[in-house]
Image: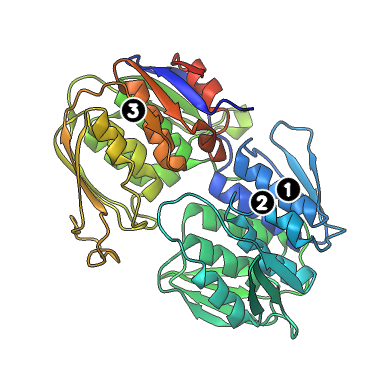
Amino acid sequence: MTNDVLTVHGGTPLHGQIRVRGAKNLVSKAMVAALLGDEPSRLFDVPRIRDVEVVRGLLELHGVKVTDGVEDGELVFDPANVESASTDEINVHAGSSRIPILLCGPLLHRLGHAFIPDLGGCHIGPRPIDFHIQALREFGAMVDKAPDGMHLTAPNGLHGTKLELPYPSVGATEQVLLTAVMADGVTELRNAAVEPEIIDLICVLQKMGAIIKVHTDRVIEIQGVPRLGGYTHRPIPDRIEAASWAAAALATGGDIEVLGAEQVDMMTFLNVFRSVGGAYEVTDARPRAGQEGKIRFWHPGGELRAVAIETDVHPGFMTDWQQPLVVALTQARGLSIVHETVYEQRLGYTDALNTMGATIQVYRDCLGGTPCRFGRRNFKHSAVIAGPSKLHAADLVIPDLRAGFSHLIAALAAEGTSRVYGVDLINRGYEDFEAKLAALGAHAERG
């Protein structure tokens, strides 16, 4: 039985070098896209994380042959024998990931029917699937709700349509892309998400033969095609993991070089990191010389400065960046403000930081000017962090993936020995994080 507890001896600055691989938020979607092809696909730089295991299992249940390639982190997908999977088999994955709903479009195209089990994922807000279901219905899908989940059919096939999302949801945009590429006719999606991972998914689909135009003002136009082939793709690096290690360097007073990190998709984070008082150095990739890009992040000494942050959809400050950075902000002089506008229940992790000596107050008010859906709905979605605060060890229970990494950073920055429970949840999005901690000189062990 796995011991899901990490004992962390804090107070030691992290120093050293680690590497990030392909973005978690792209890799799993590229794996789903392989279902649409009638030829094998090849994906490189795939991280060894729980979400990848879940999607691999789902694809294999549906007859996709998934094999490890020659290169470390390479997966090959052969969709020649796609078939139906029993609801019982699919339900084995219920609650472990929110990816199953993205299989609907590809399965409706390949088989004419699909099944969605109860969905899991991190508990950071309801994250309703209404957008997904409504979009699928607009394409012509019939949705029947049942106690074990939802059964979908497309008796008349799927057809292009015009859609406008009430919010630029990443998941709903992915759903539309994966469904529209083989729907009969043209699909126009307005108020689409345009995150780097979305653009990278479009690159994957285009390699397969899709015709997708990205217009200004969040409009994406997809012309359906009758067939798609395979792809060979190396995904963009994980900008969330890179920023998490950057925050760890800042919070612990350390110096971490993140191999694979790229500047272009982290510009908003880098601006805030520098404003707080952190230092970084970018080394661009030189493919011909066999040199990959990297960013070195470090605490240059002196006091950190308080900042005001508002999370937002891309190109704003990413919601997944705020939790790790808030740990560093507990060490900044003055009052820092965080206005969370993407997920309504993403500040619960601050309770644990307060038990460690931080001074963080959460509010229902919008402490910022960015338009927000939560201001009058009674959600505590703004935080004021007063610092600097001396953090001390505590027993911590991880509530979700990103908050879990922030708890881990806090334990590393605190004086004394902390016990962090539920660390296996971090494996959902951070590859070999314990080995990376060891490489950076952290003192931590299971149990």
Query: According to the image, label 3 marks what residue?
Result: 410
Query: Is residue 280 placed above or below 165 in the rendered structure?
Result: above
Is residue 315 in view?
Answer: yes
Residue highlighted by disc 2:
93
Left or right for 12, reference 375: right
Mark 3 / mark 1, whichever is N-terminal: 1
Percent coordinates x, y for residue 90 in the rendering = 72, 56
Residue designated by label 1? 57
Instruction: Decide if residue 210 is in sight here.
Output: no
In the rendered structure, which disc, 3 or 2, sits on the residue that comes first in sequence? 2
The crowding category of the residue bearing disc 2, from other C-alpha atoms within 10 Å (few below 14, some 14 to 19, many at least 20), is many
Q: Amino acid at mark 1?
A: Gly
Task: Name the image quarter holding the N terminus.
Answer: top right
Q: Are marks 3 and 2 in contact (CB under 8 Å)?
A: no
Question: With 28 as the anchor, is 326 left or right in this view?
Answer: left
Residue plotted at (64% across, 78% down): 143
